Image (cartoon, grey):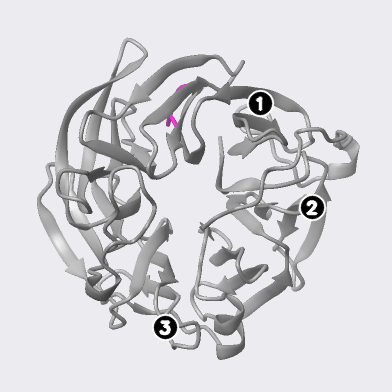
Amino acid sequence: MQRRVFLGLAGSLLAASALGGWTVARQGRQPLLLSARNDEQGRHWAVGYHLDGRQAFATPVAQRCHDVVPHPSRPLALFVGRRPGIESYLIDTVDGRLLQTLHSPAGRHFYGHAVFHRSGEWLYSTENDTGEPGRGVLGVYRLEDGRLRRSGELSTHGVGPHQLLWMADGETLAVANGGIRTEADSRVAMNLEAMDSSLVLMKRDGSLLSHEALPERMNSVRHLAIAADGTLVSGQQYMGDAGDLAALVAIKRPGQAFQAFPVAEAQRQMLNQYCASLAIHSELRLLALTAPRGNRLLIWDLDSAALRLDSHLPDCAGVAAVAEGFVVSAGVGRCRHYDCRGDRVLATPLTLPAGLWDNHLRMA
């Protein structure tokens, strides 16, 4: 989706005392919010901020990034190139040093998402085979001596892969194959009349475990969130008519089929046929979703599907779980913290830099 030029990085800091008790230290430090941003000149940045507003780093990068992949045990994160980017950036999250510019090989480009294996030794990245546009592959990279080196690739058993995540066992990959073919240097869909979107579960060796699809052919499975118990939720981008009914949120509970999540029609219409970022809070059993085209943040009970929050949030972007609930970035205005522990969800603005953030954020 074409997005407006980012606002500047300037912004005043939020005093730590104003955060009250909801900023929880991890291993003796505050959580670090990682995301991609631009500035008013259109330059690209990989940034890290503490939730009290302190900037940890802001590193300039050559190409716009999309998702961020924190290393499971080291102060590293890969800022993944946005489709059809050919560069991703390995950043030291302590001081923001650019440790490596990771280039996609010839005939491949990044799709914006990747995951580290729990061992920290392997990374898997969704990529496009530009020789056969849309054929999904996972680039397999090994972290050796502080650098990522390509080891091989696997088929995603589908077309146009976007996000991928680990299932609860830490060894099974869930891949959202968006079903949309694009050329090497383009974001233009080539096959809307023949889309083939799917949710795939596969082993690390590439073997296929399951391949499921939603009934609406033009419903692109794009973004994922997975709970600790293995419940998986996807957010879709519907490529058909604006008035068509489509399951924009879907769920796969352990042992069950991939199917629509029960979203009330009023909320489904507000999504404006597009879901951006999802997060699950496993302890509170909550699902959060951002819909920037509809300017909505929605939070549901994961088990009952009861709606906990329907909030207008202009150009809302990334969402991530924190101890008390969720942190949400926004394209217009302030980032926010949502405390979901009580009967009512309480929103608190964060004085992080205001303005357009990319569609994903991660806590490290």
Spatial distance from mark 3 to mark 2, Cα to Cα?
A: 30 Å
Judge by depth and name the residue closer to the eye, 128 or 271: 128
Badge 2 element: loop
Judge by depth and name the residue closer to the eye, 265 or 86: 86
Badge 1 element: loop
Q: Amino acid at mark 2?
A: Gly
- Which callout, 2 or 1, points to the residue nearer the camera? 2
Residue 153: horizontal and vertical position, in percent?
16, 37
Spatial distance from mark 1 to mark 3, Cα to Cα?
A: 45 Å
Judge by depth and name the residue closer to the eye, 55 or 20: 55
Q: Amino acid at mark 1?
A: Gly
Tell me which segment is drawn in magenta: 70-74
The residue singled out by tag 1 in the image is 28
Crowd around label 3: few <14 · some 14–19 · many ≥20 (10 Å): many
Is residue 231 in view?
no
- Which callout, 1 or 3, points to the residue nearer the camera? 3
Q: Is residue 286 above or below residue 117?
A: below
- Mark number, residue 80: none
Q: Earlier in the sequence, mark 2 or mark 1?
A: 1
Residue 161: horizontal and vertical position, in percent?
29, 53
The residue singled out by tag 2 in the image is 333
Judge by depth and name the residue closer to the eye, 332 or 19: 332
Q: Amino acid at mark 3?
A: Ala
